[in-house]
Amino acid sequence: MLAPEYQRIMSVLEAGAAAGRGGMRAGELAAALGLELVPAKIEGLRRRAKRLVDRAWIAQHRPGVFSILTP
C-alpha cells in the first residue's frame, strides 16, 4: 500500500487521464494538489513522482511529464 501523499499523486494522475490529459508536469500536479507553487514544494513533488516511476506505479513518457500507467 502507498503512503497517503503518494496516493494523492496517483489519484490526480488518474483524474487527469480520465479527462483526456496525456500527462502532467510537477507544477501542474502541485497546483492540482493545492500546494504552494514554490520551487521547494514542486521539487519535492517531482522527487515523489520519480519514486513512483522507479517503482513502476506511474510512467514518465517524456522528461518531467508524469502519467498513470495504462494496462
Image (cartoon, rainbow, N blue to C red):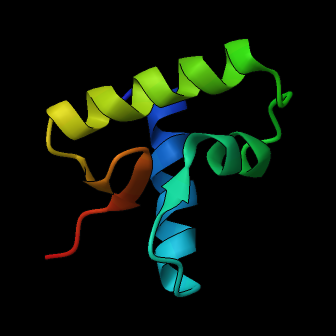
Among all residues in the image, which is located at the extreme bottom? 20
Q: Nearer the viewer, residue 2 or 68?
A: 68
Question: Quarter-wise, where is residue 53 in the image?
Answer: top left
| Picture quadrant of residue 19 | bottom right
Where does the image place residue 22, in percent across and percent down from the top left? 45, 76
Left or right, 61 with respect to 65, comes to: left
In the image, residue 62 sits, relative to residue 69, either above or below, namely: above
Q: Quadrant of the C terminus?
A: bottom left
Identity of the residue drawn at 55% across and 50% down: 25
> Residue 40, how many percent across, how many down?
70, 12
Residue at 23% of width from left, 46% of height from top? 57
- Residue 1 seen in the figure: no
In this rendered view, identify the residue nearer to me: 66 or 10: 66
> 65 and 55: which one is in front?
65
Residue 20 vertical position relative to residue 33 in the rendered view, above or below:
below
Q: Is residue 28 above or below residue 34?
A: below
Residue 13 picture location, percent across and down: 49, 60
Q: Nearer the viewer, residue 13 or 2?
A: 13
The residue sitting at 33% across, 31% down in the picture is 50
Which residue appears at 51% of the width and 44% of the height?
Answer: 9
- Can residue 13 be seen at all in this image of the molecule? yes
Q: Is residue 31 left or right of residue 66?
A: right
**In this image, 32 relative to 21: left or right?**
right
Point out the image quarter for the N terminus. Answer: top left
Horizontal relation, residue 43 to residue 66: left or right: right
